Image (cartoon, rainbow, N blue to C red):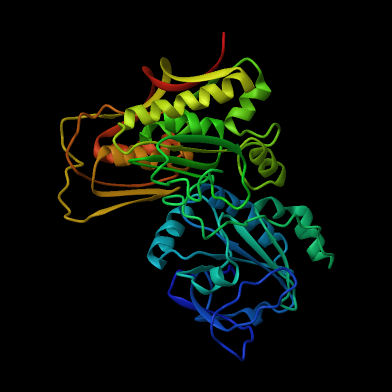
Amino acid sequence: MKKQLLFGTLFLTIAIQNSIGGPIDPLRVGDYLPVVITQRVLNVEGSLVNLSSFKGKYVILDFWATYCAPCVAMFPSDDSLQKEHGRDVQFVAVTDQKMSVVQNFLSHYKKNGEISFPFIVEDTTLSSLFPHTYIPHYVWINKEGKIIGITDGSQVNKENIDQLSKGQLPKFVEKDDSINTSYDIEKDPVFQNSGYTNAFSDSLFYQSSISGYRRGFLNQITHSEDRIAATDISIEALYAFSVGKFQKEFIYPNRFIANVSDSTLKDIITGYCPGKGYTTSDPEIVAWQRKYSFCYELHTPSKMSSEDKYQLMVDDLNRYFGPLYHIKGAMEERSMQCLVIRRTSDIDKIKYVSGKKKIASDSYSVEIHGGHVRDLMSKLLQNYQLTYPVLDETGYSGPIDLELFCKLSDLKALNKELAKFDLEIDLVPRTMKMVVVSDLP
């Protein structure tokens, strides 16, 4: 009889031992699961599931989120491995997102593909037991409840699962997720000035610094009235933010051009690991990106205009990377293929009438109530669903009601959904501003 998968509100009880109680200590490879927790779960049969029911199997916890495109991209292979090795292996997806959000995602995902393992939702305990910064994040547990691996998605492959099925322990590449959690980029200096105990001393009027990758920092950037700070980001990202003056439209790769003759230099600029790609699910890619990641900090008088601060950052980058790589960054107008959103009639089918306030999306849906067309554009670009720049030519300035349910990277399916609102998205040439890094003359 064909197995029926349910989306009801169930509970997953993970049976592990702890006679003391109190705060949860993070677990490492070699530890055993120590506490008893109960979590809500989807996509299982029955009303109660206990980890002890997986006795005799290897359990693989997959920490993910609906907004994480690399996480969702892992599901087809995870599901295939689950079906092939179901007698020996049990995948369990884990997220802290609300049940309703995951239910909505699964209902749309299942229109495009199958998925056969349980989903723990609204989790707090497992993420405390296995703290992490980046997702997807996988925890491997053997048949006795011992943690045998903590990895990224690159280790979840047929070779390793085959080894488990044969009773062999794969040689996992452990995920390096070490982050300096006490560091706050919004207020803490990236660099300590040798002449000052604090880089923001009242006697320091101007300072800028550049370094390479610094272990323990997130890849992030921030700016305030007297400071710009960035940690562990690519050359592309540094130029995108500075040349683009921190405007959101320029942070996506489809608004950046590496116009350099050397293909290896282009990879260095963009963070593309040769022969591998961009995703952080591979140790070689992580190593490459760290080798070519940079930290930057600019401290200025608070009265300096934002325009001047951004230009100072561009000048700093050009002064450093110019001699190093013989490149410069600037804003240029280019003729590009773009995806243009247009109205197909004068009938207003997106007028905001619901009274709801919601802007949300994942790889298979967009819901906008009380937002604007610019929010639709942002959601279509989120997690790089679409690889071309997206322009708004609707001429519509008011708030909208709109719900799209399809694979957002599928233009044919997307247009079918947009047609319900007398909208279309089409690939056409346009002249637009682009952040360009070019060879020096």
Q: Going 57% across and 65% down the picture, which residue do you hit? A: 131
Seen in the picture, residue 118 relative to 196 is either above or below; the reply is below
Q: Which residue lies furthest to the top in this view?
A: 441
Q: In which quarter of the image is the N terminus?
A: bottom right
Total tally of numbered discs in the picture: 0
Direction from residue 24 to residue 351 in the image, left or right: left
49 or 37: nearer the eye? 37
Q: Please say whether residue 340 is visible from this viewpoint.
A: no
For the residue pair 291 and 353, the one nearer the viewer reads as 291
Q: Where is residue 55 in the image (x, y as percent from the top left)?
A: 71, 79
Q: Residue at x 57, y 57 (%)?
A: 180
> Does 264 sit left or right of 219 as displayed?
right
Where 307 falls versus 180 (above or below)? above
State whether residue 292 appears in this view: yes
Residue in front for this viewpoint, 357 or 222: 222
- Could you tell me residue 76's position as x and y percent? 60, 52
Q: Quadrant of residue 294?
A: top right
Instruction: Determine the image quadrant of residue 247.
Output: top left
- Residue 440, placed above or below residue 414: above
Q: Nearer the viewer, residue 155 or 273?
A: 273
The C terminus, quarter of image: top right
User: What residue is shown at x 67% (from left), y 77% (from top)?
Assistant: 54
